[in-house]
Amino acid sequence: MSFRTSSHLTVLFCLIFISSVVFGQEEQARKWVDKTGKHELQAKFLDLDGDTVLLEMEGGKRMKIKLDQLSFDDQKYAITARTKMVASGDSSPFKSVGDSPMPTTPEKTSSGDEAKVINVRWTNARVMNPLLAPEEWSLEPDPAPATEAIESNAIPLPVKRDFFEGLSGTTADAGAGLVCVAHTLDHGGQKNTRVEVVDLKAGKVVRQAILDNLWAPLAVSDEGNTVVMRSNTFGFGGKERLAIWQMNADRTATPLRGWICGQPQARGGSAKDINWGAMVEGNRLVTLTGDGRLTIWDSEAGEPKAYMDMGSNAHATVSPGGKYILCGVGSALVVIEPARLRLVASLNIPEAEDQSAKVSVSPDGTRFAFGFGSNTHVYDFASARRLHEVVGISTFGDLAWADENHLLVGTGSSRSLINLEAGFLVWTYSGMS
């Protein structure tokens, strides 16, 4: 199996999460428009059969049209209507010829009891000290893998199994055009996770399974048949376990191996919890635990190859191509090359002293942003020369690049989009996340 970094996804995608609702009333005639906007038709929706929409006009005459020939709004309407029919058991007697556009939830739960649990040995791991990172800075930009354009479209997922089922996380492989989506259910004696791997190019779910216990995704392989998951149980210590699952074609999953990421002597509370993780160059996995320990793992053996203790306020990210790990450590930015397990550069930023820092790299790998307090500095990646400075916008929450010139700053309920070249705030959103 092979993985790529998931720090950036260079395509726009829309996953529709549709809960089970009763579809009790008959469909009414409405206007349907083709994707060119030149042709329209007044008709009633009957069914979505594979990639074909079945409509009924006044007088009873029926017509078929390919889903991708309709306008985006009408495609979304057809998918939603079909989903409600499936959820209510009111689906049409017409039988699908090809793949169903609305995948169903697997019935069998895959247990993790047979997983190989690895006893982690830290004694052979290389110790990295951020204070010993070279002060000179001369790095080659590490852009995201080249990808073919993917048309924005709605991709349906299986209907919600239960009112109490909720999204636990998503992760993406930008180069392969794959997204892993996970929902957890912890209610009424049930404690499991529904996982789907979505192929954005094909526009459909290609792997799915229900895993025993509660998990959140960290990475998905290029082939879409392997996922890296982190335990996602409420409370201190509930996020300390890491597991690698094989996603099978028969809608089951096989646990391959798992281990506890935190060091044995870590103090209580959330010290061992995995706060962040990603795949990096060399098919290695990097994690950051609550006590500030950044660890580079051999993902095949579950063996720590190197670690660096940075403190509880530390933050880390991966360059788009997976070649570098950038770490915010106090008032310094430290860069690691995981394939060679070595520190390669550092940058001192005195204004960030005693503040929780965030760092993020642009999709093309040419710039990085370093945020602390209500300040964000943007630097040239190759030389660490400061290019822009944004003042007065809190960096609490996310620090992410919308594209090479726009930076998204804030939390789910309060976000700001900044145009860096023009030096102004495009918009601010405050409300529901």
Image (tube, helix red, strand yellow):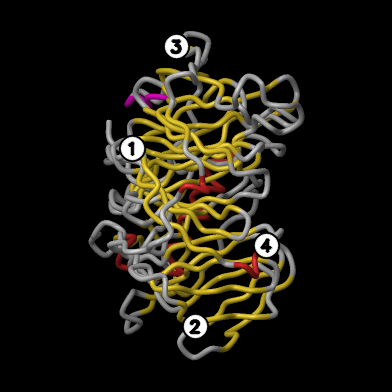
In the image, 102 versus 225, the foreground residue is 225
Q: Amino acid at mark 4?
A: Glu
Q: Which residue is mark 4?
A: 353
Q: Amino acid at mark 3?
A: Lys
Marks 1 & 2, CB-CB < 8 Å contact:
no
Q: Position of residue 290 (x, y in %)?
A: 66, 38
* The label number, if any, that marks residue 116 in the structure image: 3
Nearer the N terminus, badge 1 or badge 3? Answer: 3
* The label number, if any, that marks residue 221 in the structure image: 1
- Tell us which disc is closer to us: 1 or 3: 3
Nearer the N terminus, badge 1 or badge 2? Answer: 1
Q: Is residue 13 magenta?
A: no
Marks 3 & 4, CB-CB < 8 Å contact:
no
- Tell us which disc is closer to us: 3 or 4: 4
Q: Amino acid at mark 1?
A: Ser
- Tell us which disc is closer to us: 1 or 4: 4
* The label number, if any, that marks residue 420 in the structure image: 2
Q: Secondary structure at mark 3?
A: strand
